[in-house]
Amino acid sequence: GAGVSQSPSNKVTEKGKDVELRCDPISGHTALYWYRQRLGQGLEFLIYFQGNSAPDKSGLPSDRFSAERTGESVSTLTIQRTQQEDSAVYLCASSLAGRRLEKLFFGSGTQLSVL
Amino acid sequence: AQSVTQLGSHVSVSEGALVLLRCNYSSSVPPYLFWYVQYPNQGLQLLLKYTSAATLVKGINGFEAEFKKSETSFHLTKPSAHMSDAAEYFCAVSESFGNEKLTFGTGTRLTIIP
């Protein structure tokens, strides 16, 4: 597709369940980011992938959060044993390889609601 | 550590009036600064960015922002608001040496009054 695609667009889950969020970046973009936006707050950095380098996981809030990326394509963000405070919009963004701080292209996000 | 403060979570201006959205940053090194816009039901899009070249940066849709180091500010302006400018605007900062992480402000929702 032409843009960053995220699925599902909405996810409602029960506290304690695991969820998996998917991101398809723009083809050719080797940099991929995950951000979280809680209601009324700014975007919170979670994790960054760049090519085959080790990901920057410094933003992951707890060990319940993990993310993987298959080569330079799809990424999945997994939240285990979800808590109500995990409710937020999870945004994925991608940018071109090797061009530090080139503009990010964002997906429309996944709205996660933990009941 | 870097941070961004956006003053005013909601701003309303009349159509044709000046738009001014405020952003102040904190950074231990010379920063890269960005404004992103999110139109209803769309993903964030880059409006403009400052990367230590000209201090007055022009972006899309008639917006511009001026980097003022003495005030640690990067306010976004547009001389004449249009109805299509109604959106949420986010200021972001990244430290310019080796830091890939953008730190975003809490956003400002701009409403245009007909």
Image (cartoon, rainbow, N blue to C red):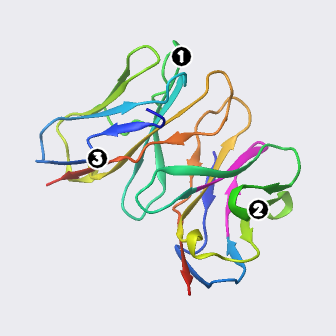
Q: Quadrant of residue B77?
A: bottom right
The relative height of residue B35 versus residue B51 in the rendered view (above or below) is below
Can marks 2 and 3 be said to lie on one chain?
no
Residue where numbered disc 3 is placed = A9
- The answer to whether residue A56 of the structure is visible from this angle is yes
Q: Residues within 10 Å of mark 3 (few under 14, many from 20)?
A: some
- The answer to whether residue B27 of the structure is visible from this angle is no
A94 vs A19, left or right, is right
Query: Where residue A51 is drawn, which disc sits there?
Result: 1
Q: Chain of mark 1?
A: A
Q: Which tag is nearer the camera, tag 2 or tag 1?
A: 2
The residue located at (27%, 52%) in the rendering is: A87
Residue A57 appears at what percent x and percent y?
45, 28
Element under disc 2: strand
Q: Main secondary structure of the magenta part?
A: strand
Q: Chain of mark 2?
A: B
Element under disc 3: loop
Distance from disc 2 to disc 3, alpha carbons, whole Å, reads 32 Å
Q: Magenta segment, which residues?
A: B22-36
The relative height of residue B106 versus residue A30 in the rendered view (above or below) is below
Element under disc 1: loop
